[in-house]
Image (tube, rainbow, N blue to C red):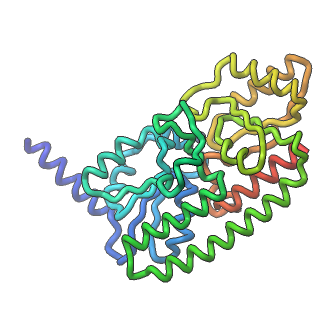
Amino acid sequence: MKKILFLLTVLSIVSCGEKKEDNGKLQVVTTTTMITDLVENIGGDLVDVNGLMGSGIDPHLYKASQGDVMKLDGADVIFYNGLHLEGKLVEVFEKMNEQGKTTIAISDGVSEKSLIGSEYFASNYDPHIWFDLTYWNEITYYVTEKLIELDPENKLAYEANRDAYRLQLIDLRAALNVKIQELPKERRILVTAHDAFNYFGRTFDFEVVGLQGISTATEAGVKDVQRITNFIIENKINAVFIESSVPRRTVEALQAAVKAQNHDVKIGGELFSDALGSAGTIEGTYIGMYKHNVSTIVNALK
Ligand SMILES: [Zn+2]
């Protein structure tokens, strides 16, 4: 008993130490880098944002560390993707919710009717919603609304940040549309390491093929590699893509399988799918990530 009490005391001291002294700012914890970037854009100087996952991290496989639990414990609000993207964190969020913590799934900000269905997820939906620019705009509004509910005094500032960011998203869409036009419709076939690009495909009229199922929790099998090898040869596809948050070996195995049939397919470059690039780089923002992906795809396939 004494031991347990001692442990509890140590834990509570540690967790107090972890909490920043009260600087009056809303303490926000986010999961993926896309959500971290969004909340930083809307929250600006008014919030402290603490992202759990860094660049190159796969959210499907991510497990909370003891340090994460402390961060979550010190948060005023937790923003996560939902739709079972963060498959191994669902229980942690449920526990936080039971403790009275505000947890918000950004996917609640989009209309369920238009979501792409998926049998791979307990949610029955494809969770890679950030690649739909219309959703991302809706989510920008949703997150702003939630921040204002928690911090109504700063309503006008949040709204101003939201409106400025919204304009950037409009510019982004225009720039992407121009770039995509360089690629004729018949070349718009995207083969990637895992099935993260269905919303991208719907937005920009691409056929999308993922080597691993929609979640990286399932490995690509020999059959998948064979099926996609045939697909590449039949459709004369000249490039396939690796992803920063997925090991490249499955795509390399695919490339080797195509070569074994006396055809060539190049690796067209690295895409940022479930995580942004490193903080401080252009690809470390949602907008930079999207531009990078589209120019990498268009330049390799055209
Ligand atoms: Zn994914």
Q: Residue 163 falls in which quadrant of the image?
A: bottom right
Identify the residue at image location x=39%, y=51%: 68
Q: Quadrant holding ligand 1?
A: top right
Q: Quadrant of the N terminus?
A: top left
Image check: 206 left or right of 74? right
**Residue 53 or 39: which is nearer the viewer?**
39
Identify the residue at image location x=54%, y=31%: 120
Image check: 248 left or right of 68? right
Image check: 228 left or right of 71? right
**Residue 288 or 247: which is nearer the viewer?**
288
Identify the residue at image location x=90%, y=46%: 184
Measuring from the top left, give residue 99's x and y in whole percent. Answer: 25, 53
Measuring from the top left, give residue 114's x and y in whole percent. Answer: 59, 48
Q: Quadrant of the C terminus?
A: top right
Image check: 252 left or right of 108? right
Q: Residue 127 falls in which quadrant of the image?
A: top right
Is residue 37 visible to us here? no
Residue sticking out furthest to the left:
1
Q: In this view, does 70 lie above or below 280?
A: above
Measuring from the top left, give residue 59's x and y in whole percent. Answer: 52, 43
Q: How many labels does the image show?
A: 0
Measuring from the top left, give residue 142's x and y in whole percent. Answer: 49, 64
Is residue 300 visible to us here? yes
Identify the residue at image location x=68%, y=17%: 222
